Image: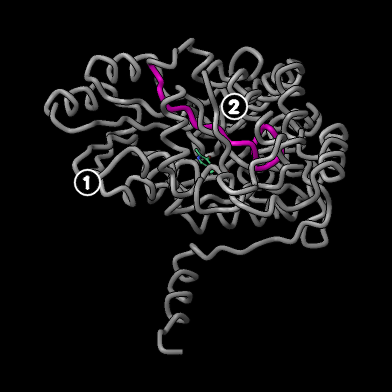
């Protein structure tokens, strides 16, 4: 080959940053068959345990019978099915926004919305810990991209005060994907409103999990569509299916239909998936016990982890990372946990900042308290007693 890819790979391996995939042969769930081994998983984003829910599976089957498999075209040609349309209406209602627009993934929603609205003469102020798709979107848009220190509304405010000519966006995760922390949305919204900036919240980890009925971190803080004009949510995490949406005003959604390239130039997601998501959205809103049980698991884990002397982070969400620091150490601990039948992936740079590698522990409503105790005892064995 003309390019020496092998030395790049070798370097990545030497830095303990090499990534590999495991082959899962069972449905998504807390018990997985993974590379041939039975595992108790604590690292999926299936927070509500809906990815393998019988009613959602049934809805997917019914959707396939009614609509077939592929959508066959983009939304603007013949791909926009009744199932997509019904889901958009349900998502608008769920998020208490005038309208919602489906995208094929959260990555594409973020790229689509930011590139449709922002261009070279504009400014994007983004939290330093925002998801990679938001960083990529800001870069692709050509706008000036400044990252403010994580959660630092004061610094953001000072930066916003200095410029009034450009069209300005403030962009944040609702719940930070690798930390589990909820963004300071009320002060962010107040600052954005005061400085005439448009606030965009990516609530990939808040939808289904946070707030009354799982309506997400924006609804939890009762922030209106004026305060948070752009709300992004994903369907592949707590809702257990696939896809994403943008919710906001009628003008925002119409603008995206006209301008968002990741909406226009791609095949619509399978209508059966949209049909299945209608069911998972109903379950997410109805089953408050899933969120309550998650809080029980989180409390049990945090108090146990504290007693074991672990460096727990200030998170109230199902994302409960254990900070390790060194990438090699995080990888080793993850491998040793696997020998105890516990699956937790090591999250390393560039997903997280240098020297902040971590075990990204997550909980699902399908975990039991006994399983949390199993996790704690495996962590104790591997981290505290170096037993492997
Ligand atoms: C997962 C994630 C995305 C991407 O969503 P997909 O539907 O998986 O492409 C976007 N933003 C955040 C904060 C995420 O965690």
**Residue corresponding to mark 1:** 120
121 up-or-down from 186: above or below: below
Q: Position of residue 270 (x, y in %)?
A: 71, 47
Decide if residue 152 is in sight here. yes
Secondary structure that dominates the magenta span: loop
**Residue corresponding to mark 2:** 207
Q: Earlier in the sequence, mark 2 or mark 1?
A: 1
Residue at x 70%, y 48% (from the top left corner)? 343
Decide if residue 313 is in sight here. no
* Number of other residues with Cα within 10 Å of mark 1, as a class: few under 14, some 14 to 19, many 20 or more: few
Q: CA distance from mark 2 to mark 1?
A: 31 Å
Q: Nearer the viewer, mark 2 or mark 1?
A: 1
Residue at x 23%, y 37% (from the top left corner)? 123
Q: Position of residue 375 (x, y in %)?
A: 72, 38
Are the residues flagged by discs 2 and 1 in contact, CB closer than 8 Å? no
Residue range highlighted in magenta: 227-242
């Amino acid at each position: 080959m003309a390019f020496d890819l092998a030395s790049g790979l070798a370097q990545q391996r030497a830095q303990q940053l090499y990534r590999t995939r495991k082959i899962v042969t069972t449905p998504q769930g807390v018990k997985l068959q993974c590379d041939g081994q039975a595992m108790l998983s604590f690292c999926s984003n299936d927070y509500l345990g809906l990815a393998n829910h019988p009613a959602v599976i049934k809805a997917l089957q019914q959707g396939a019978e009614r609509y077939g498999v592929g959508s066959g075209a983009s939304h603007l040609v013949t791909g926009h099915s009744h199932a997509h349309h019904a889901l958009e209406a349900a998502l608008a209602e769920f998020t208490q926004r005038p309208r919602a627009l489906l995208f094929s993934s959260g990555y594409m929603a973020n790229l689509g919305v930011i590139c449709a609205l922002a261009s070279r003469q504009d400014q994007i102020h983004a939290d330093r810990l925002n998801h990679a798709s938001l960083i990529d979107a800001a870069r692709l848009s050509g706008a000036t991209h400044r990252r403010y220190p994580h959660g630092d509304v004061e610094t953001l405010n000072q930066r916003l005060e200095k410029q009034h000519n450009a069209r300005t966006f403030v962009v944040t995760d609702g719940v930070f994907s690798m930390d589990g922390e909820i963004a300071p949305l009320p002060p962010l919204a107040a600052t954005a409103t005061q400085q005439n900036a448009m606030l965009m919240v990516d609530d990939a980890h808040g939808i289904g999990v946070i707030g009354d009925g799982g309506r997400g971190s924006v609804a939890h803080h009762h922030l209106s569509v004026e305060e948070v004009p752009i709300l992004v949510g994903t369907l592949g995490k707590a809702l257990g299916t696939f896809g994403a949406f943008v919710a906001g005003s009628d003008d925002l959604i119409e603008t995206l239909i006209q301008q968002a390239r990741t909406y226009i130039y791609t095949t619509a997601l399978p209508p059966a998936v949209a049909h299945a998501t209608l069911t998972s959205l109903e379950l997410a809103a109805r089953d408050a016990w899933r969120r309550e049980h998650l809080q029980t698991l989180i409390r049990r884990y945090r108090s146990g982890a504290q007693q074991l002397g672990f460096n727990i982070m200030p998170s109230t969400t199902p994302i409960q990372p254990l900070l390790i620091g060194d990438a090699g150490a995080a990888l080793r601990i993850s491998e040793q946990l696997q020998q105890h039948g516990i699956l937790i992936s090591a999250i390393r740079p560039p997903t997280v900042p240098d020297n902040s590698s971590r075990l990204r522990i997550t909980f699902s409503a399908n975990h039991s308290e006994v399983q949390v105790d199993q996790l704690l005892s495996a962590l104790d064995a591997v981290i505290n007693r170096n037993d492997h």
